[in-house]
Image (cartoon, rainbow, N blue to C red):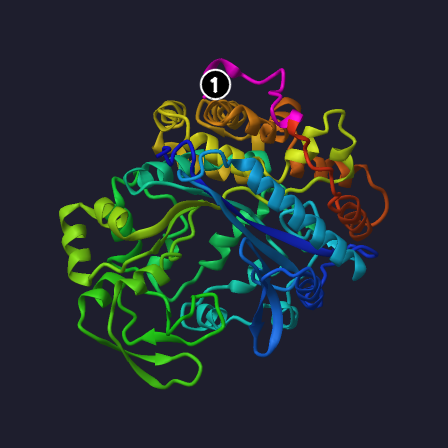
Amino acid sequence: MADMRTHPTLGIELEMPVVDLGSGASFDARELFPRLYEARRRRGEAVTPVLASGSLIGVAGPLVVSSVDNGFNNLESAIGIVGGPDRPGSNLNDLACLVQRELSELAATLGELGAGIANLSEHPSTPISESFYRAMRAPKPIYDYWRGARGWRHEVGMDAKAQNGPTTGVEATHAVEALNLALLAAPALIAIFANSPFEAGEPTGFKENRLQIWTRMFAEPNFAGDRTTHRPPVRPFEDLAHYVRWMFEGNRAMQALPLGNNSYKGFGELARMDGDPALLTFLRAPSWAGRRLRDGKVVEVTPSLRDLESLQFSQFLDARIRFRFDTEPGVDAFFEALDAGRMEKLFADHCQSLYIEGRAAGANFPDAELCDHDDPLVPASVVMAPSALQKGLQASPGSLRRLSDLLPWRDLRLAREEAIRHGLSGRAGPLSLARFARAVLEEAEAGLAPSERWMLAYVRHVLDTGRNGADRAIAAFERGTGPRAARLDDLVQARTMRLVPPVPFPQRDRAPESAGLAKSA
């Protein structure tokens, strides 16, 4: 069987700011979903409607779920999974085909509504009022719980702050190493894909203002532990037991628990456990009382490892370990493995899937300026570039050690803040983020198959020019004339996503002349 490191399962979650093509304003895209559903059903696709309070807010198929993130002005497409060790001939090109098809259909259907997708990771001129938040927010019960019971400022993300989230399968024995690698590389991905220099009609002084969301959302939480789960730990994770304890022990009050066949961001019942225990405390109990969020009705819950599976999202770092159980471990077996440091074996024995979810890269799409580039691979590779970096890093043996030599873990928080504020011109001590990003590119290129390396063309373009999406947006804004609001509207319209032709297979097999192939996989 092929190695998961070289032939991992692959997927992606794309978030997409939706804008009015006429005005550049943020656009409510809820009318998109009935059109998508009918079109896919007419084609004979096996689709299921995603409903909330009787309204269609998404379309689910075998390989693509088209829906919304936190609000109707921010689409989210979950695409995949493809590949894996049982399909060693499958690679990122299979995922790229699905992404191309999804973006093409979304762009065409949005166009019928007078809307499009903006090449920005945050809408630059959307003021967030309570009325706007309530009107635009997706109707997910967890959001009221976050704002009320936990004191989170969920509204700060309602101006379509959008990320590109690659998912890359890992084996349990390599999961923590892969997570540490993704976290260490995150400043490079933030700097390369920074694309949000404006907010609420004003320059922010940040190249990736999108990532200010966590500091602001958790500014005054009701539970002290919520202040820390978006900050990288002071040392790398040692193993899965360390990761689980960091997320679910001590002052980490557990999230509201989905009841029945439901997810935390779904539309079914959620319950808040009495006393807001840490999840590991809750799991050790034979039963626990709580109250349903919808009506306050008392419920008695018997803890199980499905609750761990349901609440695995409970950290907001630049990467997560995600998993799905095939066979559910018993609670006693779980704690035996946790106490003995044998979580890797427990996950290997019981998980149907295990993967790294990347969260560092801001949303980027091909726009008119990129499509004018002499090399067609530059615009063609924009959306797939974060996936190529994440897969390539994972498949490059020793990449964590070599990158750690450049950026010690103790400097990770500083490097991350520098990337958010300054992009490629940021520094962590003597290390420039441009130099670190180049090292990340070289490591990723070494881990990719030759037919996948075309997806790094956009990364190479950004590093060669020293200009990411935010830099280009700032330059376009400064070239403009007239009032600030009009210039930002012009910017949004100029940055509307353009469709590019699929990359032909001969191009996929051609490694760019500038590629550093001395480290070929």
> Pointer 1: residues within 10 angstroms few (<14), some, or many (20+)?
some
In the displayed structure, would residue 92 be above or below residue 316?
above
Magenta includes 512? yes
Magenta includes 446? no
Say which of 205 and 48 sits in front: 48
Q: Which residues are magenta?
A: 506-521
**Horizontal relation, residue 171 to residue 25: left or right:** left
Q: Is residue 414 visible?
A: yes
The type of residue carrying mark 1 is Ser
Which residue lies most toward the front here? 44
The C terminus sits in image quarter: top left
Residue 184, position as x, y percentages in the image: 41, 35
The N terminus sits in image quarter: top left
In the displayed structure, would residue 468 be above or below residue 325?
above
Residue drawn at point x = 74 percent, y = 58 percent: 109
Residue drawn at point x = 45 percent, y = 38 percent: 87
Residue 402, position as x, y percentages in the image: 38, 23
Q: Is residue 196 visible?
A: no
**Horizontal relation, residue 153 to residue 497: left or right:** left
Q: Which SS class for mark 1?
A: loop
**Horizontal relation, residue 50 to residue 268: left or right:** right
Residue 219, position as x, y percentages in the image: 45, 58
Task: Name the residue that disc number 1 marks.
Answer: 520
In the displayed structure, would residue 124 be above or below residue 271?
above
